[in-house]
Amino acid sequence: MKALPRRTLLAAALGAALAAGAPLAQAADTPITIMVGGINKIIYLPAKLTEALGYFKDEGLKVELQSQPAGVDAENQLIAGAVQGVVGFYDHTIDLQSKGKEIEAIAVFGKVPGEVELVSTKAFNAGFKSMADAKGGKTLGVTGLGSSTDFLTRYLADRAGVASKEYSLLPVGAGATFIAAIKQDRIQAGMTTEPTVSELLKTGDAKVLVDLRTEEGTKAALGGLYPAASFYVQNAWADSHKAEATKLARAFSKTMQWISTHSAEEIAEKMPKDYYGSDKALYVSALKASLPMFTKDGRMPEGGPETVLKVLATYKPQVKSGNINLAKTYTNALVAGK
């Protein structure tokens, strides 16, 4: 029997796969686009670091990192199919499931939020010294309405006995826009991350009100570990692109292991200069304050999803009434995948 040309055999195999409903793997030369909810934030540092260490390339992946200051906007890009994955807060997976969207974290970077509720020094001197003092029409800054900083701020206020009508939330982004909002007194307090925290503490424009960079501070404020920074994708994409999802999770897992065995100075050396500008020492200091929040291998910390669900269910009707299946919001199966 005459041998069929190789191209004909490939076409036949492709047709058979389609007929059987088998998902097609993403073409090797097609970039996987990942949206990061603020790429220069230290909580999301593993995204850029994975690229810098060459771990995406080692896995045979072509990855394009994009930045979107607010996590809620990044998740919208994911749902719309404009990007394949998001580096953002794990709590979005639960919130979205309550709205009928299935998203799962396949690598977890932070076992705690890494966020800090800062109060302006002016407001602190006027008596704003705990979340209970948010009463009386104070304005609290968040990155965006519907963002994780929004979720957490509402919960901290509620736990301190402050009703939502007694304060207001203002989306001010992160970095320079957050700093300006504090200095201009457009917000009296707000939630942000490193290196913004260290910048405001250094200039004396703000003080720490609630510290969610450590396990101790997070447990005291939220009642348990609160896994936050993570890499999540649509469940359907992970199912239809198992090889790519596994390689991505494995690359991030390698990065988390690298972080756990290197110093803040060594990590800073791998980051782009524009991440720390003219004050590298401040960046290293911010890194040192942040290192305890990272997982060592990209796995979801035990008990973490339950804490996040408890926080969201406190004030989000959809989550409270929805039948949330936490097992569908994350998986540890891919971080050590072969």
Image (cartoon, rainbow, N blue to C red):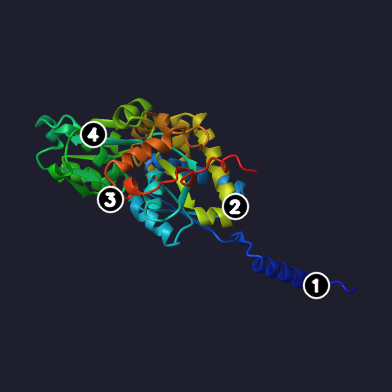
**Marks 2 and 4, how far apart at CA:** 41 Å
Residue 107 x %, y %? 50, 42
Give the residue type at disc 3.
Answer: Gly
Instruction: Mark 4 vs mark 1: give the one in front.
Output: 4
Q: Choose the circle earlier in sequence order: 4 or 3.
A: 3
Residue placed under numbered mark 3 in the picture: 144
Q: In this view of the protein, can residue 236 be seen by the observer?
A: yes
Q: Residues within 10 Å of mark 1 (few under 14, many from 20)?
A: few
Looking at the image, do the residues carrying marks 4 and 1 touch, with CB atoms under 8 Å apart?
no
Disc 4/disc 3 C-alpha distance (Å):
21 Å
Percent of width and height locating residue 37 = 38, 49
Q: Looking at the image, tell me whether mark 2 or mark 4 is earlier in sequence order.
A: 4
Mark found first going from the N terminus, 4 or 1: 1
Query: Considering depth in this image, is 31 or 278 the residue closer to the camera?
Result: 31
Q: CA distance from mark 1 to mark 2?
A: 30 Å
Residue 257 against residue 326 in the figure, above or below: above
Q: Secondary structure at mark 2?
A: helix
Contact? badges 4 and 3 (CB < 8 Å):
no
Mark 1 or 2, nearer chain start = 1
